[in-house]
Image (cartoon, rainbow, N blue to C red):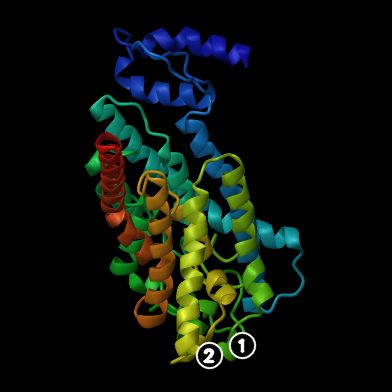
Amino acid sequence: MKALRKQIDKIKPHFIKGGKFSWLQSTFEAFETFIFVPNTVTKIKGAHIRDSNDSKRTMIFVVIALIPVFLFGSWNIGHQHDIAIGNTENTIFLQFWFGFLKILPLLIVSYIVCFGIEFGFAQMRGHEVNEGVLVTGFLIPLIMPVNIPLWMLAISIAFAIVIGKEVFGGTGMNILNPALTARVFLFFAYPQKISGAIDVSGTPVWTSTAGGTATDAFTGATPLSYAAEGALDKLPKLSELFIGTVQGSIGETSTLAILIGAIILLLTATASWRIMLSVFVGGIAMTLIFNAFGANEFMTLTPMQQLCLGGFAFGAVFMATDPVSATQTNMGKYIYGFLIGLLAILVRVINPAYPEGMMMAILLMNIFAPLIDHYIVESNIKKRLKRFSKVVNN
């Protein structure tokens, strides 16, 4: 690492003010601070705590937490492919390799578009490249169907980064989760490619049948689709839902892998446990309310089934806890998370047009997060003024 440091220090003068490549200063700093902790200190007077765990390393922790989901999703793509075409000869490694090759183009396109836009805006504004792009570029392919066309993916990412983040000032200023903004754009712009079992061209949405022909028994429906249709007899076992050996978005099927990621986030203090916990509590509360009524088959699902279906667990762990678009106050985090869980189950059960309610619930609560924080802060101010007036009067 010392040799690398020396090389960076050697070329650094060319990229700072007065150097012949000073117009690429933002890009150079992005690569330098990605590898080494910035050699800077706070210039203003006062007591400060300095920590090498800056925002770049925080984002890297999120990427590390996503790796179990990515690995399982890669294997499950190959596993579902073999089930769809009736192939029983592939090994676990071959299934993983098939899935990895399907995900790789999505990741490459995602990072090219994300970094291209991010670097472009950083250069135009003369700002540093924001590290949130590392997470966004990894998250977006994981919440997509494996068969999503690459050009659609590129357009949705460009829309999400430009309209959902950069117009507000970039990372830290956006009010909506960029990854979910990309997904909701696809949902409304190209619904045939992200909902249902088979798209208009007859291609399965959630399972790749490349290199083979789907068997007659293959339907292409996800467990959430069966639940929404009331076909509970076709719903996989709870153990299959929990492990994730079912069809769905690449990274959303395995609650087990998502929980491993959640443990990594919590141990590194990267995500809020208050939000995670309250999202699950809200989802369980709404499910129990529906269980009490039981007006249709979807309402009779158990809390564990609801939590393991679709993108509920993934949204609770990786989306709702976005430190930028979520609430900042402790009490606000409880309210914010609880309402996300509540609304996610409410939307998916009540509204047949949106069986995956998690996306809508999180984006809606993103909008209300500043309002929740405002009223929590105002409430605390009133309580303290009330206590102060009592002390003065006594």
Q: Which amino acid type corresponds to the residue marked 1 in the rendered image? A: Ala
User: Residue 50 location in percent, x, y?
Assistant: 49, 20
Residue 231's label in the rendered image is 2
Q: Which residue is mark 1?
A: 217
Residue visible at 31% across and 45% down in the picture:
380
User: Residue 235 location in percent, x, y?
Assistant: 59, 83
Residue 61 visible, this orientation: yes
User: Residue 245 location in percent, x, y?
Assistant: 65, 70
* Quarter residue 323 falls in: top left
Q: Secondary structure at mark 2?
A: loop
Q: Which amino acid type corresponds to the residue marked 2 in the rendered image? A: Ala
Marks 2 and 1 close (CB-CB < 8 Å): no
* Quarter residue 93 falls in: bottom right
The span from disc 2 to disc 1 (Cα, nearest Å) is 16 Å
Quadrant, the N terminus: top right
Front residue of this view, candidates 93 and 367? 367
Q: Secondary structure at mark 1?
A: loop
Residue visible at 47% across and 44% down in the picture:
135
Q: Work out whether mark 2 precedes mark 1 in sequence or the reverse, and give the earlier one.
A: 1
Residue 59's label in the rendered image is none
Quadrant, the C terminus: top left
Residue visible at 47% across and 23% down in the picture:
33
Compared to 347, does 176 lie above or below?
A: above
